[in-house]
Image (cartoon, grey):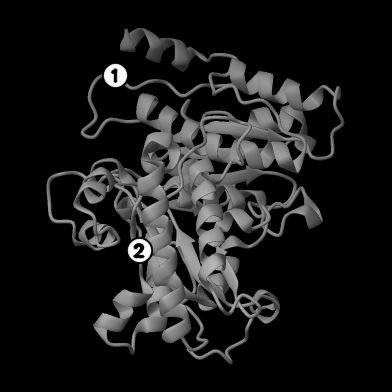
Protein backbone atom coordinates (compact mmCIF):
# COMPACT_ATOMS: atom_id res chain seq x y z
CA UNK A 1 0.00 0.00 0.00
CA UNK A 2 1.44 3.39 -0.85
CA UNK A 3 1.15 6.75 0.80
CA UNK A 4 -1.56 7.99 -1.55
CA UNK A 5 -4.05 5.48 -0.14
CA UNK A 6 -6.51 7.66 1.75
CA UNK A 7 -4.33 9.41 4.35
CA UNK A 8 -6.26 10.31 7.46
CA UNK A 9 -6.60 13.78 8.94
CA UNK A 10 -3.94 12.83 11.50
CA UNK A 11 -1.33 12.08 8.84
CA UNK A 12 -2.21 15.20 6.91
CA UNK A 13 -1.76 17.49 9.92
CA UNK A 14 1.09 15.95 11.91
CA UNK A 15 4.79 16.18 11.09
CA UNK A 16 7.04 13.16 10.80
CA UNK A 17 8.78 11.99 13.97
CA UNK A 18 12.30 10.84 14.74
CA UNK A 19 11.00 7.85 16.72
CA UNK A 20 7.92 5.91 17.83
CA UNK A 21 8.02 4.45 21.35
CA UNK A 22 6.32 1.05 21.82
CA UNK A 23 5.75 -0.74 25.13
CA UNK A 24 3.56 -3.33 26.83
CA UNK A 25 0.88 -1.72 28.98
CA UNK A 26 0.26 -2.64 32.58
CA UNK A 27 -2.47 -1.72 35.05
CA UNK A 28 -1.61 1.37 37.13
CA UNK A 29 -1.15 0.95 40.87
CA UNK A 30 -2.74 4.30 41.62
CA UNK A 31 -5.88 6.06 40.45
CA UNK A 32 -3.79 9.24 40.36
CA UNK A 33 -1.97 7.97 37.26
CA UNK A 34 -3.40 8.19 33.79
CA UNK A 35 -5.20 4.82 33.51
CA UNK A 36 -3.59 3.57 30.31
CA UNK A 37 0.05 4.64 30.60
CA UNK A 38 3.04 3.79 32.78
CA UNK A 39 4.58 6.74 34.64
CA UNK A 40 8.14 5.57 34.05
CA UNK A 41 7.50 5.04 30.34
CA UNK A 42 6.22 8.61 30.17
CA UNK A 43 9.25 9.85 32.09
CA UNK A 44 11.64 7.99 29.78
CA UNK A 45 9.81 9.28 26.70
CA UNK A 46 10.19 12.88 27.83
CA UNK A 47 13.89 12.35 28.63
CA UNK A 48 14.50 10.75 25.23
CA UNK A 49 12.68 13.55 23.40
CA UNK A 50 14.85 16.12 25.18
CA UNK A 51 18.00 14.21 24.27
CA UNK A 52 16.95 13.83 20.64
CA UNK A 53 16.13 17.54 20.31
CA UNK A 54 19.55 18.41 21.69
CA UNK A 55 21.22 16.50 18.85
CA UNK A 56 18.79 16.91 15.96
CA UNK A 57 19.26 19.32 13.06
CA UNK A 58 15.77 18.89 11.59
CA UNK A 59 13.70 19.95 14.60
CA UNK A 60 11.92 22.55 12.48
CA UNK A 61 10.63 19.77 10.22
CA UNK A 62 10.25 16.75 12.51
CA UNK A 63 8.78 16.12 15.95
CA UNK A 64 11.16 14.42 18.35
CA UNK A 65 9.00 11.42 19.17
CA UNK A 66 5.58 9.85 19.67
CA UNK A 67 4.04 7.53 22.22
CA UNK A 68 0.44 6.73 22.94
CA UNK A 69 0.36 8.77 26.14
CA UNK A 70 -0.02 11.80 23.85
CA UNK A 71 -3.30 10.52 22.44
CA UNK A 72 -6.51 11.93 23.86
CA UNK A 73 -8.58 9.19 25.52
CA UNK A 74 -11.60 8.18 23.48
CA UNK A 75 -9.99 8.63 20.06
CA UNK A 76 -9.80 5.77 17.59
CA UNK A 77 -6.51 4.55 18.98
CA UNK A 78 -5.77 1.88 16.37
CA UNK A 79 -6.10 4.35 13.53
CA UNK A 80 -4.15 7.05 15.35
CA UNK A 81 -1.28 4.70 16.14
CA UNK A 82 -1.24 3.36 12.58
CA UNK A 83 -0.93 6.93 11.34
CA UNK A 84 1.87 7.65 13.83
CA UNK A 85 3.72 4.51 12.74
CA UNK A 86 3.42 5.77 9.16
CA UNK A 87 5.39 8.95 9.87
CA UNK A 88 8.09 7.65 12.25
CA UNK A 89 11.66 7.01 11.11
CA UNK A 90 12.83 4.82 14.00
CA UNK A 91 10.90 2.28 16.08
CA UNK A 92 11.97 2.03 19.74
CA UNK A 93 10.40 -0.99 21.49
CA UNK A 94 10.79 -1.31 25.26
CA UNK A 95 11.42 -5.03 25.63
CA UNK A 96 10.17 -6.81 28.72
CA UNK A 97 8.82 -10.31 29.37
CA UNK A 98 5.31 -8.96 28.85
CA UNK A 99 6.19 -7.27 25.55
CA UNK A 100 6.48 -10.62 23.78
CA UNK A 101 3.12 -11.77 25.16
CA UNK A 102 1.31 -8.56 24.32
CA UNK A 103 -0.64 -8.66 21.06
CA UNK A 104 -0.96 -4.88 20.92
CA UNK A 105 2.76 -4.22 21.33
CA UNK A 106 3.69 -6.90 18.80
CA UNK A 107 1.07 -5.46 16.47
CA UNK A 108 2.80 -2.07 16.63
CA UNK A 109 6.09 -3.69 15.76
CA UNK A 110 4.58 -5.64 12.85
CA UNK A 111 2.86 -2.50 11.57
CA UNK A 112 6.12 -0.52 11.49
CA UNK A 113 8.06 -3.41 9.93
CA UNK A 114 5.53 -3.51 7.10
CA UNK A 115 7.07 -0.25 5.89
CA UNK A 116 10.52 -1.84 5.74
CA UNK A 117 9.63 -4.94 3.74
CA UNK A 118 11.77 -3.92 0.74
CA UNK A 119 14.85 -2.87 2.71
CA UNK A 120 17.94 -4.98 3.27
CA UNK A 121 18.08 -6.73 6.65
CA UNK A 122 20.98 -4.58 7.89
CA UNK A 123 19.09 -1.39 7.16
CA UNK A 124 15.92 -2.73 8.79
CA UNK A 125 17.90 -3.26 11.99
CA UNK A 126 19.09 0.33 11.96
CA UNK A 127 15.48 1.57 11.99
CA UNK A 128 14.51 -0.65 14.95
CA UNK A 129 16.43 0.26 18.12
CA UNK A 130 15.27 -1.93 21.02
CA UNK A 131 15.68 -1.06 24.69
CA UNK A 132 15.88 -3.66 27.46
CA UNK A 133 13.20 -2.13 29.65
CA UNK A 134 12.92 -5.02 32.09
CA UNK A 135 15.18 -8.10 32.30
CA UNK A 136 14.08 -11.08 30.22
CA UNK A 137 14.05 -14.62 31.68
CA UNK A 138 17.48 -16.20 31.91
CA UNK A 139 16.34 -19.32 30.11
CA UNK A 140 15.92 -19.47 26.35
CA UNK A 141 17.48 -17.55 23.51
CA UNK A 142 16.74 -13.83 23.38
CA UNK A 143 18.34 -12.20 20.33
CA UNK A 144 16.12 -9.17 21.00
CA UNK A 145 17.82 -8.63 24.36
CA UNK A 146 21.23 -9.02 22.77
CA UNK A 147 20.46 -6.26 20.29
CA UNK A 148 19.26 -4.02 23.10
CA UNK A 149 22.50 -4.58 25.02
CA UNK A 150 24.49 -3.32 22.03
CA UNK A 151 23.58 0.22 23.14
CA UNK A 152 26.15 -0.05 25.94
CA UNK A 153 29.88 -0.28 25.26
CA UNK A 154 31.23 -0.17 28.82
CA UNK A 155 31.27 -3.67 30.36
CA UNK A 156 30.27 -2.58 33.88
CA UNK A 157 27.41 -0.40 32.62
CA UNK A 158 26.25 -3.20 30.37
CA UNK A 159 26.14 -5.56 33.35
CA UNK A 160 23.96 -3.12 35.32
CA UNK A 161 21.71 -2.63 32.30
CA UNK A 162 21.36 -6.38 31.63
CA UNK A 163 20.67 -7.21 35.27
CA UNK A 164 18.16 -4.45 36.02
CA UNK A 165 16.75 -3.11 32.77
CA UNK A 166 16.46 0.56 31.88
CA UNK A 167 13.25 1.03 33.87
CA UNK A 168 15.14 0.41 37.11
CA UNK A 169 18.01 2.62 35.98
CA UNK A 170 15.48 5.37 35.24
CA UNK A 171 13.88 5.04 38.69
CA UNK A 172 16.98 4.79 40.90
CA UNK A 173 19.28 7.75 41.41
CA UNK A 174 22.16 5.32 42.08
CA UNK A 175 22.17 4.47 38.38
CA UNK A 176 21.77 8.01 37.08
CA UNK A 177 25.10 8.02 35.24
CA UNK A 178 24.38 4.71 33.51
CA UNK A 179 20.88 5.88 32.59
CA UNK A 180 22.14 9.16 31.11
CA UNK A 181 24.82 7.38 29.08
CA UNK A 182 22.35 4.88 27.59
CA UNK A 183 19.86 7.65 26.88
CA UNK A 184 22.53 9.68 25.08
CA UNK A 185 23.65 6.72 22.97
CA UNK A 186 20.08 5.86 21.99
CA UNK A 187 19.29 9.47 21.07
CA UNK A 188 22.48 9.70 19.00
CA UNK A 189 21.56 6.57 17.04
CA UNK A 190 17.99 7.76 16.47
CA UNK A 191 19.16 11.11 15.10
CA UNK A 192 21.90 9.56 12.95
CA UNK A 193 19.56 7.01 11.35
CA UNK A 194 16.79 9.55 10.77
CA UNK A 195 19.02 12.21 9.25
CA UNK A 196 21.28 9.96 7.15
CA UNK A 197 18.85 7.20 6.14
CA UNK A 198 15.34 8.68 6.41
CA UNK A 199 12.41 6.48 5.48
CA UNK A 200 10.27 7.51 2.55
CA UNK A 201 6.72 8.30 3.58
CA UNK A 202 4.75 5.08 3.40
CA UNK A 203 1.53 3.75 4.85
CA UNK A 204 2.06 1.28 7.70
CA UNK A 205 -0.15 -1.77 7.81
CA UNK A 206 -3.25 -1.07 9.88
CA UNK A 207 -2.75 -1.92 13.52
CA UNK A 208 -5.20 -4.64 14.47
CA UNK A 209 -3.77 -5.99 17.70
CA UNK A 210 -2.72 -9.15 15.81
CA UNK A 211 -0.98 -11.47 16.00
CA UNK A 212 -2.96 -12.69 18.99
CA UNK A 213 -0.63 -14.28 21.48
CA UNK A 214 -2.02 -17.34 23.23
CA UNK A 215 -2.66 -16.30 26.80
CA UNK A 216 -3.62 -19.76 27.96
CA UNK A 217 -7.24 -18.80 28.42
CA UNK A 218 -10.38 -17.72 26.60
CA UNK A 219 -10.90 -14.27 25.17
CA UNK A 220 -12.46 -11.55 27.29
CA UNK A 221 -16.04 -10.82 26.23
CA UNK A 222 -17.31 -7.23 26.39
CA UNK A 223 -20.94 -6.31 25.87
CA UNK A 224 -23.46 -3.61 26.75
CA UNK A 225 -26.97 -3.51 28.12
CA UNK A 226 -28.46 -0.35 26.68
CA UNK A 227 -31.37 0.93 24.67
CA UNK A 228 -29.16 0.72 21.59
CA UNK A 229 -26.60 -2.00 20.92
CA UNK A 230 -23.15 -3.17 22.05
CA UNK A 231 -21.69 -0.11 20.23
CA UNK A 232 -23.39 2.30 22.65
CA UNK A 233 -21.78 5.78 22.96
CA UNK A 234 -23.02 7.51 26.13
CA UNK A 235 -20.31 10.18 26.03
CA UNK A 236 -21.08 11.48 22.55
CA UNK A 237 -18.49 13.89 21.21
CA UNK A 238 -16.12 13.20 24.13
CA UNK A 239 -15.40 9.70 22.79
CA UNK A 240 -15.05 8.58 19.18
CA UNK A 241 -15.31 4.96 20.33
CA UNK A 242 -18.25 3.07 21.75
CA UNK A 243 -17.67 2.30 25.43
CA UNK A 244 -17.40 -1.42 24.64
CA UNK A 245 -14.72 -0.74 22.02
CA UNK A 246 -12.81 1.44 24.47
CA UNK A 247 -12.77 -1.31 27.10
CA UNK A 248 -11.80 -3.86 24.44
CA UNK A 249 -8.90 -1.69 23.27
CA UNK A 250 -7.75 -1.32 26.87
CA UNK A 251 -7.85 -5.10 27.32
CA UNK A 252 -5.90 -5.70 24.11
CA UNK A 253 -3.23 -3.24 25.19
CA UNK A 254 -2.94 -5.22 28.42
CA UNK A 255 -2.36 -8.37 26.37
CA UNK A 256 -5.82 -9.98 26.50
CA UNK A 257 -7.56 -11.13 23.30
CA UNK A 258 -11.02 -9.59 23.37
CA UNK A 259 -14.36 -9.80 21.59
CA UNK A 260 -17.12 -7.18 21.55
CA UNK A 261 -20.48 -8.88 21.08
CA UNK A 262 -24.18 -8.31 21.57
CA UNK A 263 -25.67 -9.32 24.92
CA UNK A 264 -27.28 -12.50 23.61
CA UNK A 265 -23.94 -13.80 22.33
CA UNK A 266 -22.23 -12.75 25.55
CA UNK A 267 -24.75 -14.87 27.47
CA UNK A 268 -23.86 -17.92 25.35
CA UNK A 269 -20.11 -17.33 25.82
CA UNK A 270 -20.29 -16.50 29.53
CA UNK A 271 -20.04 -20.08 30.90
CA UNK A 272 -16.50 -20.33 29.51
CA UNK A 273 -15.22 -16.76 29.33
CA UNK A 274 -14.52 -13.69 31.46
CA UNK A 275 -17.24 -11.15 30.72
CA UNK A 276 -17.75 -7.43 31.24
CA UNK A 277 -21.26 -5.97 30.90
CA UNK A 278 -21.56 -2.20 30.60
CA UNK A 279 -25.00 -1.31 31.90
CA UNK A 280 -26.85 1.84 30.88
CA UNK A 281 -28.36 3.25 34.06
CA UNK A 282 -31.19 4.55 31.89
CA UNK A 283 -32.62 1.06 31.41
CA UNK A 284 -33.65 1.02 35.06
CA UNK A 285 -33.38 -1.63 37.76
CA UNK A 286 -36.14 -4.00 36.53
CA UNK A 287 -34.63 -4.32 33.03
CA UNK A 288 -31.12 -4.74 34.44
CA UNK A 289 -32.35 -7.47 36.81
CA UNK A 290 -34.02 -9.37 33.99
CA UNK A 291 -31.16 -9.00 31.52
CA UNK A 292 -28.40 -10.23 33.85
CA UNK A 293 -30.41 -12.93 35.59
CA UNK A 294 -28.67 -16.30 35.37
CA UNK A 295 -25.27 -15.06 34.23
CA UNK A 296 -22.28 -16.64 36.04
CA UNK A 297 -21.00 -14.95 39.17
CA UNK A 298 -17.66 -14.09 37.50
CA UNK A 299 -19.37 -11.64 35.14
CA UNK A 300 -18.36 -8.07 36.07
CA UNK A 301 -20.98 -5.37 35.48
CA UNK A 302 -20.30 -1.64 35.36
CA UNK A 303 -23.21 0.81 35.55
CA UNK A 304 -22.62 3.87 33.37
CA UNK A 305 -24.70 6.87 34.37
CA UNK A 306 -23.60 9.55 31.92
CA UNK A 307 -26.98 11.28 32.07
CA UNK A 308 -27.51 10.99 35.82
CA UNK A 309 -26.50 13.75 38.22
CA UNK A 310 -24.71 13.18 41.51
CA UNK A 311 -27.19 12.14 44.16
CA UNK A 312 -29.67 10.60 41.71
CA UNK A 313 -30.14 7.13 43.23
CA UNK A 314 -30.90 4.89 40.23
CA UNK A 315 -27.28 3.99 39.25
CA UNK A 316 -26.35 3.03 42.82
CA UNK A 317 -29.61 1.09 43.17
CA UNK A 318 -28.82 -0.96 40.05
CA UNK A 319 -25.26 -1.61 41.21
CA UNK A 320 -26.51 -2.66 44.64
CA UNK A 321 -29.06 -5.03 43.16
CA UNK A 322 -26.41 -6.71 41.04
CA UNK A 323 -24.08 -6.99 44.04
CA UNK A 324 -26.86 -8.62 46.07
CA UNK A 325 -27.16 -11.19 43.28
CA UNK A 326 -23.53 -12.20 43.72
CA UNK A 327 -21.75 -10.11 41.09
CA UNK A 328 -18.65 -8.07 41.86
CA UNK A 329 -19.27 -4.69 43.44
CA UNK A 330 -18.19 -1.96 41.01
CA UNK A 331 -19.22 1.60 41.73
CA UNK A 332 -21.21 3.36 38.99
CA UNK A 333 -19.38 5.91 36.84
CA UNK A 334 -20.83 9.16 35.60
CA UNK A 335 -18.14 11.25 33.94
CA UNK A 336 -15.96 10.21 31.02
CA UNK A 337 -12.91 10.63 33.26
CA UNK A 338 -14.32 8.14 35.79
CA UNK A 339 -15.05 5.69 32.99
CA UNK A 340 -11.55 5.97 31.53
CA UNK A 341 -9.94 5.43 34.94
CA UNK A 342 -12.10 2.37 35.57
CA UNK A 343 -11.45 0.61 32.24
CA UNK A 344 -8.06 -1.07 32.98
CA UNK A 345 -9.13 -1.98 36.51
CA UNK A 346 -12.39 -3.43 35.15
CA UNK A 347 -10.45 -5.63 32.73
CA UNK A 348 -8.21 -7.05 35.45
CA UNK A 349 -11.18 -7.57 37.78
CA UNK A 350 -13.02 -9.57 35.11
CA UNK A 351 -9.97 -11.73 34.53
CA UNK A 352 -9.47 -12.22 38.28
CA UNK A 353 -13.10 -13.20 38.89
CA UNK A 354 -13.02 -15.69 36.03
CA UNK A 355 -9.83 -17.32 37.29
CA UNK A 356 -11.27 -17.49 40.79
CA UNK A 357 -14.78 -18.72 40.01
CA UNK A 358 -14.74 -19.92 36.39
CA UNK A 359 -14.86 -23.53 35.17
CA UNK A 360 -11.93 -25.87 35.59
CA UNK A 361 -10.63 -27.77 32.56
CA UNK A 362 -11.20 -30.66 32.91
CA UNK A 363 -14.23 -29.87 35.10
CA UNK A 364 -14.01 -31.22 38.62
CA UNK A 365 -16.26 -31.08 41.63
CA UNK A 366 -19.83 -29.78 41.94
CA UNK A 367 -21.13 -27.06 39.67
CA UNK A 368 -21.58 -23.64 41.30
CA UNK A 369 -25.12 -22.43 40.63
CA UNK A 370 -25.42 -19.20 38.69
CA UNK A 371 -26.60 -16.22 40.74
CA UNK A 372 -30.24 -15.39 40.22
CA UNK A 373 -31.94 -12.08 40.80
CA UNK A 374 -35.39 -13.58 41.29
CA UNK A 375 -36.67 -15.75 44.15
CA UNK A 376 -35.30 -19.27 44.46
CA UNK A 377 -37.32 -21.98 42.73
CA UNK A 378 -37.91 -25.56 43.83
CA UNK A 379 -35.27 -26.76 41.37
CA UNK A 380 -32.75 -24.31 42.84
CA UNK A 381 -33.32 -25.65 46.33
CA UNK A 382 -33.08 -29.28 45.15
CA UNK A 383 -29.88 -28.57 43.22
CA UNK A 384 -28.34 -26.87 46.25
CA UNK A 385 -29.03 -29.90 48.41
CA UNK A 386 -27.52 -32.26 45.84
CA UNK A 387 -24.32 -30.19 45.69
CA UNK A 388 -23.65 -30.18 49.43
Q: Where 27 falls versus 113 (above or below)?
A: above
Upstream in the sequence, badge 2 or badge 1?
2
Query: Residue 289: in sight, yes or no?
Result: yes
Q: Where 381 falls versus 67 (above or below)?
A: above
Q: Which residue is mark 2?
A: 211
Q: Position of residue 177 (x, y in %)?
A: 38, 46
Q: Secondary structure at mark 2?
A: loop
Front label number (2 vs 1): 2
Q: Which residue is mark 1?
A: 366
Residue lying at 75% horizontally and 47% vertically, measured from the top left: 227
Q: Position of residue 116 (x, y in %)?
A: 37, 82
Q: Secondary structure at mark 1?
A: loop
Q: Nearer the viewer, residue 161 or 222?
A: 161
User: Residue 271 falls in which quadrant of the image?
Assistant: top left
Q: How many marks?
A: 2
Q: Position of residue 348 (x, y in %)?
A: 47, 35
In screen coordinates, is 166 left or right of 157? right
Q: Nearer the viewer, residue 321 or 101?
A: 101
Residue lying at 52% horizontally and 36% vertically, measured from the top left: 28
Mark 2 vs mark 1, CA separation in Å: 37 Å
In screen coordinates, is 134 left or right of 340? left
User: Residue 289 falls in which quadrant of the image?
Assistant: top right
**Would you call the spot at circle 1 few (<14 residues within 10 Å), some (14-19), or many (20 or more)?**
few
Check contact, mark 2 vs mark 1: CB within 8 A: no
Amino acid sequence: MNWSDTPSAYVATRRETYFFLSYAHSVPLSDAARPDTDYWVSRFFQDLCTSVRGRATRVAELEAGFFDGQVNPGTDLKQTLTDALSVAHVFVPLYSPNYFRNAWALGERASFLSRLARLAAARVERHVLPVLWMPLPSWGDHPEANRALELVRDADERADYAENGLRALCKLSTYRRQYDNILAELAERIVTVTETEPLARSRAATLTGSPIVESGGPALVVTALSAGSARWRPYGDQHELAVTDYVAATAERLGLPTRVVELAEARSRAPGSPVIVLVDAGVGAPTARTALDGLPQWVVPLVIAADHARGEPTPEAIAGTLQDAGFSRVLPVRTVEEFERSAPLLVTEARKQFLRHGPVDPPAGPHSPRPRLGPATVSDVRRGKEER
